[in-house]
Amino acid sequence: MKFSYNWIRDYVNGLEMPPPELERLITMKTAECEGIEAIGSLLAEADVAQVERVQPLADGHNVKAEVITERYGRKSVVCGAPNCRAGISTVYVPVGTKMIRGVASEGMLASGAELQINGDGDGILELVNGAGNPLARCRPDSIIEVDNKSITHRPDLWGHLGMAREVAAILRMPLRDPVRPELLPPPAPSIEVSIEDLDLCPRYSALVVENVTVQPSPLWLQYRLTAVGLNPINNIVDLTNYIMAELAQPMHAFDADLLHGETIFVRRARDAESLRALNGEQYTLTPSNLVIADARGPIALAGVIGGLDSAISGKTTRIVLESATFQAASVRRTSANLKLRTDASMRFEKSQDPENTVRGLARAIELLQEVSPGARVRGGVADRRLKRSEPAPILLPLAWLARKLGREVTKPEVRDILERLSFSVSEPEPELFAVKVPSWRATKDISVKDDLVEEVGRMIGYDSIEPRPPAVLTRVPPKNEERAFHHSVRDLFTAQGFTEVYNYSFISEEQARAFKFDPEAHVRVANPIASDQALLRTSLLPLIRKNIVDNSKHRDAFRIFEIGREIHKQPTGLPRETTHLAAAIYNRAGDGKAELLELKRAAEYLMPGARVQPAKARPYEHPARCGEVRWHGHVLGRLFELHPSMVEGRAAILDVDLELVERLTPRDRKYTPIRRYPSSAFDLSVVARARELAGDLETRLAGLAGEMLESIVYLREYTGPPLREDQKSVSFRLTVSSPERTLSSEEVGEIRARIIDGMRRQGYELRV
């Protein structure tokens, strides 16, 4: 947002502070400024000049012009502008004497672009004869640019009067209001206004003006608009833009003779209605778009842009001035849907002050007398509005204010600050202010007492508040056992070479059906952010499978795991959430046995002593490679290989209920001292049936080893000659020891022999 220093000075009587100092003051007290740009430097010495005669030069392009100026007398100037001719009034700038193609030029004749009055650089500026000194109100200026993000909550600061009000309050200077409400005509409007939904349009004011002459705006008006980034068009359009930049009240002018009927309608667009906008684009509308319409159809997009079919042109003699407020969300929605953002929509998106609509019309009546002499108002103001009760004053306890600020502020100082900012202050009780908010600050800006603390704080200066740490005793929060347990699980699996993945809790119906899950058994998202995220997951597996498929495109082998929540739909009430661990090992090559055994080992680290028992395969599991994970008499999850139809390669998966694991994990651990005496180990290979479980063999061996057994470890499995096809050899390493002495070789041999004999009596053959 750009602010003209001269424009602000017009409303702050006595303002002489240099622009850089004012910029810093605004940054510290109101809104962050991004810089200052000096404009119109040539205007300091510019003068009106009358071209008496011109003489073409030899090059055929430039001419030598003899001009008479009011301040500098007669001058001879070389000019290359195509419109430089005898008899016109233009602008002379004394920039020194230069030789141009051998001819002395005593200064220059300037274009509007060179003077920064407008953007016309095609020729020198042509002035209207007999109009006095058109440069009298054009002087060098400084443009202060304010960061838009810092005033997004301040609709009043999107106009110069709002910023001038801030400056006047900060510097304790009087503010001049340019609006003269007494200019508004009495009731009995000559046009009617009908509003379909007052929530979408809280106020709409309109006024008919006749005997209008459409022509270029005065130079001062063009200069003001150009300075703040608006393009001059003609006096009527420029007038509405000027009021928008001055009062932060967007306005629009319709050609009254191009409207159908005597009523303006504010309504939702009908399906498939269209509007040809001022930018030349044709827009197809929906009921989500609010429009301004006449009896035939839309003539403007409310708060965004006007229509071309009712636009002001050189033939216009009667206009309807529109000054309204629209629901901020409605304007934003229309602007976003149509990808059309305008200076008006940016202001309406901030929630404009409904009291400002008739002020804008009063200001327009005054300016019309200057930009279009002879224009006269026909009838009164057509004004329709939503009647709202006046908001209750905000109660501000002064002791609470001081505590919030972190420093003492006297009662007179607080009252003075608030009243300078146009708040009305009363004291219903000692040390308690009742603060009434002005209308231009009451639209989603100031609503609670905390907002008033901010007002007082910025005015006294935050640098006046001594920074102190909070005077609150800090306490160490109680340990979150669940979080600590999850951290330990993460540490365990990352130490085993796994990489943690994070997935959303949403899946698609296709992902659910791939695992034969019923989509109707899932909680459905009412407003999904994407079409493939319509269901809340009841298992981590669909997205783990997606992780496997995606990563398998780039890697031949990897390990991943996720700790996340399953969300299960309940007959009544909220869904039930349970935390699960899903770990996967993928390998494009191999037979997949090693991956299953590796995951079993990882599960035993998490749950020491856990066993895996064969189980009936689920639709997404390999029919011969799946089992239940059992621990302490409970089934905690599944260990399986993903069905070959679901992934290319081999993917072993461990899925366990982490909440149950945490519940069954002992809180207290028993200390086991380091063994003082050496241990002895030996290997045994048991010949068993091909489908017999290695875990069952391990249990039998451990039972025969007795209390001297320190550990038993599975080593390998062998099939092939000389074994039969229905046999396999399973090898284990047994370690035995005593806490009291070193076992002799005879004692170790006795234990080994006892195991061998016991296994043979149970019908097993041992390879020793």
Image (cartoon, rainbow, N blue to C red):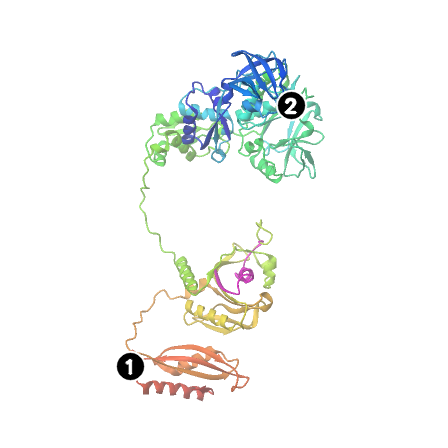
Type of amino acid under label 1: Thr
Numbered disc 2: secondary structure = strand
Q: Nearer the viewer, residue 59 or 175?
A: 59
Can residue 252 be seen by looking at this rendering?
yes
Alpha carbons under labels 2 and 1: distance apart: 109 Å
**Would residue 335 be counted in the magenta stretch?**
no
Q: Nearer the viewer, residue 229 or 363?
A: 229
Q: Nearer the viewer, residue 626 or 10?
A: 10
Q: Please tell me in which quadrant of the rendered image residue 522 appears.
A: bottom right
Screen quadrant of the C terminus: bottom left
Q: Nearer the viewer, residue 37 or 82?
A: 82
- Relative placement, left or right, of 81 versus 479 is right
Q: Is residue 229 above or below residue 523?
A: above
Type of amino acid under label 2: Val
Q: Residues within 10 Å of mark 1 (few under 14, many from 20)?
A: some
Where in the figure is residue 661, as x and y percent of width and height? 43, 65
Q: Which residue is mark 2?
A: 320
Can residue 369 be seen by looking at this rendering?
no
Residue mark closest to the camera, 2 vs 1: 1
State which region is magenta.
Answer: 533-562
Q: Which mark is residue 742?
A: 1
**Would residue 560 be counted in the magenta stretch?**
yes
Who's the residue at 56% across and 70% down the image?
Answer: 622
Answer with mark 2 or mark 1, whichever residue precedes in sequence. 2
- Relative placement, left or right, of 455 versus 510 is left
Q: Are marks 2 and 1 in contact (CB under 8 Å)?
A: no
Q: Residues within 10 Å of mark 2 (few under 14, many from 20)?
A: many
